[in-house]
Amino acid sequence: MAQQQQPQPQRLSAYAGYQHFLVTSPSPLVAHVEIHRPAKLNAFYEAMWLELRSVFRQLSSDGDVRAVVLSGAGDRAFTAGLDVTAASEGGSVLSAEPGLDGARRAAKLRRHVAEFQECISAVERCEKPVICVMHGISIGLAIDIACCADIRVCAQDARFAVKEVDIGLAADIGSLARLPKVVGSQSWVKDVCLTARDFSAAEALSVGFVSHVHESKAAALAVAVHMAEFIASKSPVAVQGTKELLNHSRDHTVEDNLRYTGVWNAAALQTNDVAAALMSGLKRKKPTFEKL
Amino acid sequence: MAQQQQPQPQRLSAYAGYQHFLVTSPSPLVAHVEIHRPAKLNAFYEAMWLELRSVFRQLSSDGDVRAVVLSGAGDRAFTAGLDVTAASEGGSVLSAEPGLDGARRAAKLRRHVAEFQECISAVERCEKPVICVMHGISIGLAIDIACCADIRVCAQDARFAVKEVDIGLAADIGSLARLPKVVGSQSWVKDVCLTARDFSAAEALSVGFVSHVHESKAAALAVAVHMAEFIASKSPVAVQGTKELLNHSRDHTVEDNLRYTGVWNAAALQTNDVAAALMSGLKRKKPTFEKL
Amino acid sequence: MAQQQQPQPQRLSAYAGYQHFLVTSPSPLVAHVEIHRPAKLNAFYEAMWLELRSVFRQLSSDGDVRAVVLSGAGDRAFTAGLDVTAASEGGSVLSAEPGLDGARRAAKLRRHVAEFQECISAVERCEKPVICVMHGISIGLAIDIACCADIRVCAQDARFAVKEVDIGLAADIGSLARLPKVVGSQSWVKDVCLTARDFSAAEALSVGFVSHVHESKAAALAVAVHMAEFIASKSPVAVQGTKELLNHSRDHTVEDNLRYTGVWNAAALQTNDVAAALMSGLKRKKPTFEKL
Amino acid sequence: MAQQQQPQPQRLSAYAGYQHFLVTSPSPLVAHVEIHRPAKLNAFYEAMWLELRSVFRQLSSDGDVRAVVLSGAGDRAFTAGLDVTAASEGGSVLSAEPGLDGARRAAKLRRHVAEFQECISAVERCEKPVICVMHGISIGLAIDIACCADIRVCAQDARFAVKEVDIGLAADIGSLARLPKVVGSQSWVKDVCLTARDFSAAEALSVGFVSHVHESKAAALAVAVHMAEFIASKSPVAVQGTKELLNHSRDHTVEDNLRYTGVWNAAALQTNDVAAALMSGLKRKKPTFEKL
Amino acid sequence: MAQQQQPQPQRLSAYAGYQHFLVTSPSPLVAHVEIHRPAKLNAFYEAMWLELRSVFRQLSSDGDVRAVVLSGAGDRAFTAGLDVTAASEGGSVLSAEPGLDGARRAAKLRRHVAEFQECISAVERCEKPVICVMHGISIGLAIDIACCADIRVCAQDARFAVKEVDIGLAADIGSLARLPKVVGSQSWVKDVCLTARDFSAAEALSVGFVSHVHESKAAALAVAVHMAEFIASKSPVAVQGTKELLNHSRDHTVEDNLRYTGVWNAAALQTNDVAAALMSGLKRKKPTFEKL
Amino acid sequence: MAQQQQPQPQRLSAYAGYQHFLVTSPSPLVAHVEIHRPAKLNAFYEAMWLELRSVFRQLSSDGDVRAVVLSGAGDRAFTAGLDVTAASEGGSVLSAEPGLDGARRAAKLRRHVAEFQECISAVERCEKPVICVMHGISIGLAIDIACCADIRVCAQDARFAVKEVDIGLAADIGSLARLPKVVGSQSWVKDVCLTARDFSAAEALSVGFVSHVHESKAAALAVAVHMAEFIASKSPVAVQGTKELLNHSRDHTVEDNLRYTGVWNAAALQTNDVAAALMSGLKRKKPTFEKL
């Protein structure tokens, strides 16, 4: 039934070149990005996160896209996180190189982490709202990525964990930077980050990590696509401004944000969308808005 | 019955000159401010937000007021937000002036938004705690104003929305600056800000936007007035210091706040209120405190 | 039964010299710190907070400790906060000295508050995770201390209050700095801080102040010790890095935290713990990690 | 001779109502504000700083003014600072009121200082560039005011001092906030602030406090007016944007400022002034720019 | 004679593909980047700043380069800034597109400015020290670029200007963000930014914008290359750490920088360079350091 | 002759226990701290910086001291910085311990650097103004320490260097955090930090690192003591407030500093020193001020 709601969405040709991400258009102005390595539980290796950055940079400036849904292919996992096997193979950044002293190894690691962070942050920097749909195994890098999305929903089979402590390291791709700012209870954040324990969809809902839980991945996806369509039907000037100002708000004082907002809207209010929106309200007709 | 609890509160003469705000004293040391334009669902136009600033500036320095309750007159709305009709009339800041280039229109809009923000922020800057009581339609500017209050309660008929996206603009009077810092779940904040959808009293309670929900406006008001009386019975040095230090905390690091707090209390602890409070504890008598 | 789970934990000899704190080891690598002045409801006076700082500084650099549980001795109170009787006795910092003008009294008070703050902050600065177990009376200073811990749990008989307003002062030892950052709902924070009203274990859970509530102090303690054991079994490089990066996150922007994290992990990833953790995962054996 | 350059500048009628400030127009689009209480060495009392705020607020939004020169009337002083006699008279905020405890006196003082600061800051907030011309006695409040100006010049007879320490207080109207950010050498800043010693025009020049020194007040004024004319001849979109972005820069990181700048110029570049300026460059004709 | 000191430096083959930048190696481990469009006074158009970013990104991670010298080709100009002719041609971002409303033009401009800024900032983000040598016309973008370098020197014929105001806009590629933090006197910064007037090499030296002035471009270049060699002879761990920590310092508090420094050096001190440097000091032999 | 001006200042008995610092009182209310290890050019090892912290903590709260002069014993050096021989001996924090992996060595180094930083910062945190007198060799740690002082003067034989790069490390005890904020020209700061080259007293004066240069150490010391006496003769409420507010200013925005200043002075203005200072001005008598 959920399949009926999303019958064979069309692949977006401009995104056909990506190897690990399938980008389709379930609805006009909406893009659906699937992490597509289901045989490996959608686990990431370096080429994938570089590709993730490319996908979201392209979406960010694609005038035909106004909202994005992000999910994982297959039944079992949104993503199982880092592909540790690949990461621990010879040639990995973590493997010791006999010739390097501690400072030089550190420089190499630091540059590696910085680029990895920058790739994942592309989801947050995308100018269009991103709705993340999680199901099944959603651990490690899954949390880093999800925290970069604007809205999070999940299937009830989702099993989450900030898993990094269990492989001997502090999460460094964004979970520790963003998770404390995404939910309210810091006691809970410290608990799941220090213990690396699993938490369920219900727990994720109760702490506000996800906005709603659905019975299946298909149902969650259907709702997310619907929400994306709804957002995409509104003024892109208003929607993209709202995302930008909320992201700015997280890292600035109220006073700073008010000042920035005033400057932002000084230009944004010079849009035809306000008149179009007001008119459509009066005429009870759906407005159309120009590309942004 | 609720009416019996608040029978004909006395109008405060010092505030009699305001046109759109009715200020009464339901109890000694408590002021009740009503947004008073019920025929228009308490919608705001420019003269009203200028007046709002005046009211709260006066309350801030009024030694006879120790706690403030803010609500909307009439049965239907706390406020329906901006009076769009008034705002879109000729002469409005949003209407194009043929002679102005984009930069000059921007300057005009920026100054307008900055002053509008500054008026609403007067509620936050008021040195006395403000308890906001919402009912019925509470959209757009209603959220900006409520976020400036210290404590929010509502009636179960309250219907909220961060409505601005629906009229083609990003909210710029404070909702995007303050709402993310007023509740925990950022997935929820992004959802309601990007979709402009309605949310109910129950949802507002579950995310922590309001502290409690009551069966009717009258009941909510009665509880708010009672809470204000309770706060007003305590040391104003302690209460106003607590408000100031909590507001400072939002926009500063813990370390900065601790330093500021130390300097603040270096003077505040030189009060007779500590002795009065301790004594009243021992004697089980209600203490009285001097004006502040 | 809970007693069976924690039969006579061994007193840690290195901490035997403390007068008001009992430090035992319920489990290898775990320290249990008890505030130990039960006859006075564990109320604090100056010598006690100076000692608290010493205890947590020592724990911070004790290679044999990887997780800490903090609780209050006796059945009645985690702590009743400041011992007001002691504080108001002659010689107290709050008592007037006739020879001092307002500025000089302020300097004395400011230095006093700053040192008091610094002592309590030692709990937060401790490099090892601290789990705080609260029961019974948990008011005033109890909140300041608990907010410095990483994870908070409580017994269902816990009765909390940010009590300072009731003795005529704004809380200045950290509650107003940290509580707003520890939970999500600022309406609730303002409510409990401005009214000084009691709140229950259930309310503390619902707002996210505590992570779970247990039927008794013994049960809460048993769970906390178990959680501490679990954390202590993991890589200390990973665990202590996670605590540090989460604490940094609270007071910095996401971008700043990502940069700091990259530099931190550039060294931390040069640990044998990653290999040990991965190997133990493959071999399904419990890894052992060197001291840190 | 310098007098010939500024013969009887016309008083600006819109500013005729001010009692302590004489506002003239030595040149189109330029306003010259004189502190005008020469009999008292232009010393300030409360009514004066309230008036200063009004004058600069009015200038800020006066479309006929594009640059401002600020100086002091008479031969002897730019300003001798606070009129201590007035300030220490009965009824002054500094005089003890027997009925008030230390906390209540502090609240009164704090509000007083905050408003005083806010008045002086109006010079900085003025959207038009302000050139401050100092001569003779320029002490105490003179420094607070001058630090709010954009450019400082002086006559060689100027005698400066951060004088507050000599009357038993730390400067609180802005000198300690702004002076360290206005010049480079902090050793010098600490020296003049801690000793309250005089410093000469030559010293002020060598540390970069003033941009140039002229042989007389008249000469300094002539140069300042000339500079103001020069600035006023340029695009007000460019000039006022430059002032705003430089002021923002002082209190923000480079990254934050670049982001703000991008948003600011997104509107500002939509001006006809760019074309007008480029065209005038090609045609070697003086461009004219619309009001802003 | 200066030519003798730099006879035909070898072109670095890895950088041979750049069209507008000539990269040579006047000395081992030193790269010399020349802006190379002398026929147009080295004025920039879009392809050039994109290329500038590529050059400096490549230098940043090139293990064979330890210090960089940046200068302009030809006798007449370091760079005359933006090539206004190119920028104002059809298709330019500044030219009006009839179909776009003010908000959409703003979005386009904002993205354009952001990318332009990001390209120029690559000079600052380069991990190796950059010494900028200016001569002749050095206006507009010249200042933006020079402010990104670490050390600035110039020939005595250099003529500088923050020129943007004269073409109707506020400088938006970094001059207003960085210049106030690069020199001490803010009165001078406001003067040159608001008036767009020229300033000489001598004035640049006296305010600390450049570190020294030389009689000719050749002499300045020779000294810069010598300085680069000197820096390149030292431990790259020490040099690159110093650059990073100084850049961090500009945008953070002292306390934050100390914390970051401690974490940085925790890895950096694990280098063989310390031993090598100490040993070379004892043996009075030039140390060699591994690549970084 | 200079010796005549400071004949045998009395050793302060409360500071007699220090081994490496000689504390005398050249004048009432003034303390003179000498780094006292002349045989080793006053080079520091661990016990010394721990002692430095103790000395300045004690001075900070010593009511009999109102200003401090800091200098180095002997003719040859203020201090030659870190005693590298001691630091590189077995047991040093820098020497490799075979049992430790890179992360554990990093933790040890980080804690070491943090404590070292904290000791040196005690000079900055001292509530009384500190005047630093430098002569002869003043390299490495000499710069870290001097940057913590309020005012810097030197003898003309002073030879300075930010020397750390030459021993293979980035300066981590404060020079890179504070030097850029102590002088204006960042081109100069980068130059001396990246090259580790010497700079002279004259150069230090011209960039504003020192406030004045004197012909000999004795002359510099005499002037510093005189300056300290002058400061010590003024209201300690005013002087110590000024130091605190200037230190706060460095790390905060103008707006934040103004707010903090208002709160600070709300207590500080309640001093008898204002009346005493004003009265002494009228009576032309030297005022006396109570201890602070």
Image: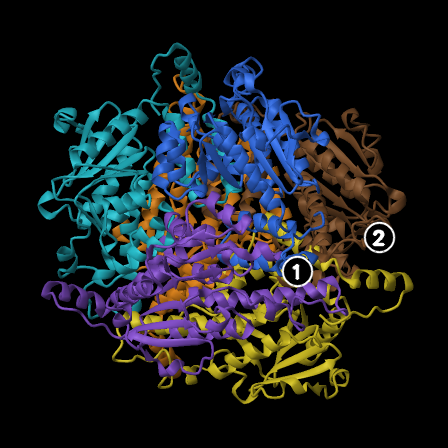
Chain colours: A purple, B cyan, C blue, D orange, E yellow, F brown
The C terminus of chain A is located in which quarter? bottom left
Q: Residue at x 65, y 49 (%)?
A: C236
The N terminus of chain A is located in which quarter? bottom left
Query: In this rendering, does residue F269 appear at all?
Result: no
Q: Which residue is mark 1?
A: C279
Tag 1: amino acid: Met
Query: In this rendering, does residue B168 appear at all?
Result: yes
As drawn, is B36 to the left or to the right of E247? left
Q: Which residue is mark 2?
A: F88
Depth check, front residue: C85 or D170:
C85
Q: Secondary structure at mark 2?
A: helix
Q: Secondary structure at mark 1?
A: helix
Residue count near mark 1 (Cα–Cα under 10 Å), binned few <14, some 14–19, many ≥20: some
Depth check, front residue: E136 or E18:
E18
For this orientation, the residue located farthest to the left is B39
State yes or no: discs 2 and 1 in contact (Cβ < 8 Å): no
Callout 2: residue from which chain? F
As drawn, is D66 to the left or to the right of F178? left
Q: Name the spot of residue D28 as percent of width and height, x first.
A: 32, 63
From the image, state whether disc 2 or disc 1 is nearer to you.
Answer: 1
Depth check, front residue: A7 or F117:
A7
When asked about the image quadrant of residue D197, the answer is: top right
Q: Name the spot of residue A4 as percent of width and height, x first.
A: 25, 72
Residue count near mark 2 (Cα–Cα under 10 Å), binned few <14, some 14–19, many ≥20: some
As drawn, is A267 to the left or to the right of B78? right
Q: Name the spot of residue D226 as percent of width and height, x first.
A: 43, 63
Do pointers 2 and 1 mark residues of a single chain?
no
When asked about the image quadrant of residue E217, the answer is: bottom right
